[in-house]
Image: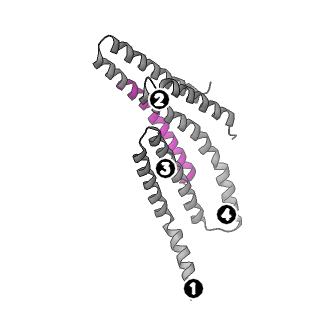
Amino acid sequence: MTPEIRTVFQIAGIGLLVAMLHTILKQSGKEEFAHWTTFVGFVAVFLIVIGYVDHLYTEIQRVFLSQ
Amino acid sequence: MRLHVLQLAGIGLVSTVLIVLIRPHAPQIAMLLGLVAGILLLIPVITNITTVISALSDLANAVQLDHGLMATVLKIIGLAYVIEFAAQVARDAQEGALASKIELAGKVGIVILAIPIITDVVQALAHLLP
């Protein structure tokens, strides 16, 4: 399992977990918590994504813009 | 360095299945997963394109092309890749208007990069014409 596919599965896992927590919290009448769970999950995934975007941009800069 | 196309296709397939699985329950995270999958597919391609670029540079040297010209063309290609990627992400997230604006920014940037070449061509034409 390469690190790339591991990241994909990790994010998918966080997504499913967040969806599940959202449903459970909503069923038990805690709408406020449900929304915060979604938000925290989004931020967690976003922190992973930011690193990859940075990597892509530096790579493009190295390959195309430093001639 | 070899490009593992089969591996990349596998990552694409697995990501597609997972995105379709997640989208109805958590659309925000499905969008981010699509973004990550796109980046993971693009990084090996960008890294391997160095081979093509060095071959092109050799050709340019062989015909004694101006080095600045080659650098400008490469810059434009890189800019086009980034702009296209960002616009596609925006379009995936149902933000077509934003995608069009990103593309507009890219087009203006490319024209600004190409201005020296355009001036050269016009000056050469002016020399040719009486």
The residue nearer to you, when weighing A49 against B99, is: B99
Q: Magenta stretch: give its range.
A: A39-67
Residue B129: image tag? 1
Q: Residue at 64% of width from left, 34% of height from top?
A: B9
Say which label, 3 or 1, has the lower sequence index. 3
Quarter holding residue B70: bottom right
Q: Are marks 3 and 4 on the same chain?
A: yes
The answer to whether any part of residue A67 appears in the image is no
Per the image, the residue denoted by label 2 is B30
The answer to the question of whether label 4 and label 2 lie on touching residues, with beta carbons closer than 8 A, is no
Of labels 4 and 2, earlier in sequence is 2
Secondary structure at numbered mark 1: loop
Going by the numbered disc 2, the residue's amino acid type is Ala
Instruction: Work out which quarter of the rendered image holds the N terminus of chain B and state it.
Output: top right
Q: Give the quarter of the image for residue B72.
A: bottom right
Do the CB atoms of the residues marked 1 and 4 lie less than 8 Å apart?
no
In the rendering, at what x and y percent does residue B114 appear? 51, 65
Quick one: label 4, few (<14), some, or many (20+) residues within 10 Å? some
Counting from the top left corner in percent of width and height, residue A9 is at 54, 24
Indicate the quadrant containing the C terminus of chain B: top left, top right, bottom left or bottom right.
Answer: bottom right
Of the residues under marks 3 and 2, which one precedes in the sequence?
Answer: 2
Q: CA distance from mark 3 to mark 1?
A: 38 Å
The x, y position of residue B22, in whole percent, is 48, 24
**Residue at x 52%, y 70% (from the top left corner):** B118
